Image (spheres, rainbow, N blue to C red):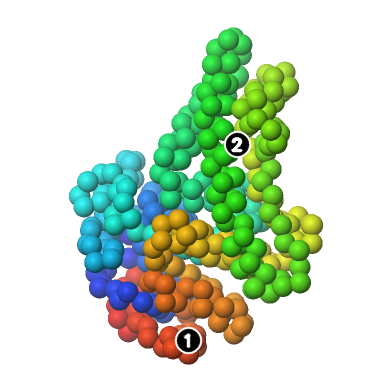
Amino acid sequence: MHAFRNIAQASLELPPYLVVLRGGNAQGKTNFLEAIYLAARGVSPRTQRDAELVSWGSDSASIEMRVDSGGIWFDREVRIQPGRKKVWLTNGHPKRGRGRQEEVWLVGYFPGDISIIEGPPVERRRFIDEAVSYIQPAYNAHVKRYERTLTRRNILLRERAADDLVSVYTEELINTGKHIIQGRIRYGELLTPFLRDFYLRLGGENMHFGVQYSGGGYELRGELEDNLRKAFRCMEKEERAREMTLVGPHRDDIIFTLEEKDFRVYGSQGEKKSLALALKMSEMQVIRKLKNTEVIVLLDDLFSELDPGRRHLLFKEVLGTGQVFITVTDEVPPMPEGWEKYTVLGVQGGTVKKA
């Protein structure tokens, strides 16, 4: 790792079990986990601005990993240069590996993930789109195509273009958007049982927890393509007046409820953090189910907030199933019986080394 945020240089061989990063606040623990996440999944869990990833005074940053996937080794590298597209390499080639032996299956929990629960709908859409794209790369092509078409259609509405021209982009949004909606719904059907189970085990055993996918201006029941087309016709005048596209998956939301009340409005901060954690643990379970593989887990700045019972539940969920990274500022939390084996890395001033 070179010039990544405040980490000037780091080179470590990491064990295939629990790794504890210990150090004070703002020393580089989260940055180290972010680098692993970025190398594995191709995106940062904390920012969409590449310039923020490069150390002050440097013109580029890089991350390199040598990965053991079931006895098969491969290399993963990310090169970051502000103003240019990130270069993401597998075995030296600028393309994503398609087989499980060329993937780094990983999920991560970061404090900012609470925005998925309490933030605007775009945060929940971003979560599910990234999760689906990670396990199904073809889905990401639909998302990118939809975004390009949406941008162009909005420009045409602002320019008051002819109806015939706008309708061409409307049909493209319908054809592409249906794949996005279907992908989100299918993923939600896989995720929801795990999410409900883990959240209730975290402390809501006697509560009624629900998840609902909400369509942005169109009806979900029935033929999706016809419903989208009908919604566009109904909103045609309003779209012209407001000069923007008001129908489609870019306006969808995922609504979490507790006792049939909107979680975003009525959930406490503790309940929202528990749900954000449950989301990430459920994402891990979906990957395990679909890919039949171990999953690396990153848990940042979490254990100090968990009571012993919840800590034990979390450890039980993640230990023994793959490599796990946690960050702590003080002492290493007590491990469940039988899982005392771990490595501690000290992090101070951007320097990472074995403690």
Vertical placement of 143 versus 116: above or below?
Answer: above
The image quadrant that residue 3 belongs to is: bottom left
x and y percent of residue 42 in the render?
37, 51
Callout 2 crowding tier (Cα within 10 Å): few <14, some 14–19, many ≥20: many
Q: Residue at x 57, y 66 (%)?
A: 277
The amino acid at mark 2 is Pro
Label 1 sits on a secondary structure element that is loop
Q: Find the residue positioned furthest to the bottom.
A: 337
User: Would residue 84 be visible to someone looking at this image?
Assistant: yes
Label 2 sits on a secondary structure element that is helix
Q: Residue at x 33, y 55 (%)?
A: 100
x and y percent of residue 325 in the render?
41, 72
Give the position of the N terminus as an image quadrant: bottom left
Q: Find the residue positioned furthest to the left.
A: 92
Q: Residue at x 48, y 86 (%)?
A: 335
Viewer-proximal residue among 154 and 257: 257
Q: Which mark is residue 273?
A: none
Q: Residue at x 79, y 57 (%)?
A: 260
Callout 1 crowding tier (Cα within 10 Å): few <14, some 14–19, many ≥20: some
Residue at mark 2: 249
CB-based contact (under 8 Å), mark 2 and mark 1: no
Viewer-proximal residue among 340 and 80: 340
User: Would residue 52 be visible to someone looking at this image?
Assistant: no
Q: CA distance from mark 2 to mark 1?
A: 43 Å
Q: Which mark sits nearer the N-terminus, 2 or 1?
A: 2
Vertical placement of 44 versus 69: above or below?
Answer: above
x and y percent of residue 55 in the render?
33, 58
The answer to whether residue 326 is left or right of residue 40 is: right
Viewer-proximal residue among 118 and 254: 254
Residue at mark 1: 335
x and y percent of residue 285 in the render?
50, 63
How many tags in the picture? 2
